[in-house]
Amino acid sequence: MKENTVPNLKIITLGSFDLQIGGKSLLSGLNKRSYKILELLKFFITFKDQKLLSETIMEKLWPDNDLQDPKNALRTQIYRLRKMLTKLGIMEGNEACGTCRLTFESGYYVFSLLDNSVLDCDLFCELINQVNELKDSDPSRAISCYRQALQLYRGEYLSENLYSEWVIPARNRYHRLYFKALLQQLELLKKEEDYRGMIETCEDSFQIDPYEEAVHVYYLEALLQLNQVKQATSHYKYITAKLYQELGIKPSPILREVYRQIRQSSVQTNDDMDYVDIIRRLKEEDLPEQAFYCEIEEFKAIYNLERRKSTRNPSNSFLGIITCETERGQIDHRELKNIMPKIKNVLLRSLRKGDAVTQWSNEIFMFIVSNTAQENLSKISRRIENNINREIDRDDFVVKIRYEAIGEKLALL
């Protein structure tokens, strides 16, 4: 029996695919013609230790290929794969030790990894399973295991195989495990009051998936605990803008609650704060020369304040509602993503500093103009429409603006 002295092979599948020995890639010298052979290797690794029929391999791996003799074509590719792995020094053979084995028995191909191979996604799962036994009894070790597991997840499973259907089940499984482990790690760090660890973990995860709102909630909470209020405010504004621009998602109640805490933390509560300090705190550092843009909840608060005022004096404040469409009807969702930010900028420039603006839905903007005579509303509309038409140069584009006097009976949902 021959002794296996081949160095350990590290197989990377979480992120970009690679084979490494001693930290050096074995694939760097391969030419572009090796693409199909590497696809076959990735397939075998994904379905390792499983009995695979030739028809199954061909159907899943190359479904669109119309070959006259598909079995022979597959045999040719497998011959080339064996030859490549032998040349790399990792294929087990009659006279050679290796790190992997590919056999054909009773009509089935079976690919196996030997003990001196380390597959990153297997190690990833092993570490997560260890944590399940440790998180209640030994939180410190659980955090360490989670940290190792999360470091292994450099990206989605075989990320370069974006459109390969056979990859999707494994990719979804590992991403689900990653996200679950990430949230559990953040919760453990929070219980241990390791807020810097929370921040580092979140920032690493933003490189993998920047749009998971739950992770941003943990990130903001950690910044708040470390009294980094300005950074928390800046990050909240950044992520809420990105979530809306990229996914059309508005802040959830949980995220808005964190923002409320951030704003509360930015106010000094010292008993010895004098009048001048209070006024200084209330003033913005730079008051922009444009209307005030706010989230829906803030907009509702301003609106209801105007309603309260109307109970004492006749209302001279109006709610403006803007909808956009084309002559054919509603605008396509993809077009809206480009158009709505332009309308927002037009409104902020066209209205006064004391007016408030919000985006109510994917297709509707609202604004409040106060201390305004009703006969001036048509001038405001004309100014907004002209500016929008200059910004969005389309003959079929239609802007509709209507107004409602703000009074006690008119309530926003």
Image: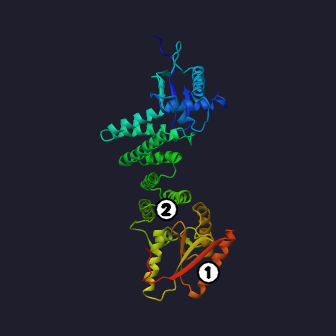
Pick the quarter of the image with the C terminus.
bottom left
Pick the quarter of the image with the N terminus.
top left
Seen from the viewer's position, the closer of residues 83 and 276 is: 83
Which amino acid is tagged 1? Ile
Per the image, the residue denoted by label 1 is: 380
Give the answer, above or below, for where 214 lies relative to 3. Answer: below
The structure residue drawn at horizontal position 30% and vertical position 39%, both measured from the top left corner, is: 137
Q: How many marks?
A: 2
From where the camera sits, is residue 268 visible? yes
The structure residue drawn at horizontal position 41% and vertical position 43%, both measured from the top left corner, is: 181
Per the image, the residue denoted by label 2 is: 250
Q: Residue 269: x and y, percent?
A: 40, 66
From where the camera sits, is residue 373 visible? no
Label 1 – label 2 distance at C-alpha = 28 Å
Give the answer, above or below, for where 266 lies relative to 381. Answer: above
Q: Residue 273: x and y, percent?
A: 43, 68
Count residues near mark 2 (Cα–Cα under 10 Å), then give few for <14, some for 14-19, many for 20+.
Answer: many
Seen from the viewer's position, the closer of residues 152 and 165 is: 165
Which residue in the rendered view is the most extreme toward the front? Answer: 68
Give the answer, above or below, for where 387 lies relative to 73. Answer: below
Seen from the viewer's position, the closer of residues 39 and 284 is: 39
Which amino acid is tagged 2? Lys
Secondary element type, mark 1: helix
Q: Residue 321: x and y, percent?
A: 54, 76
Q: Residue 36: x and y, percent?
A: 61, 32
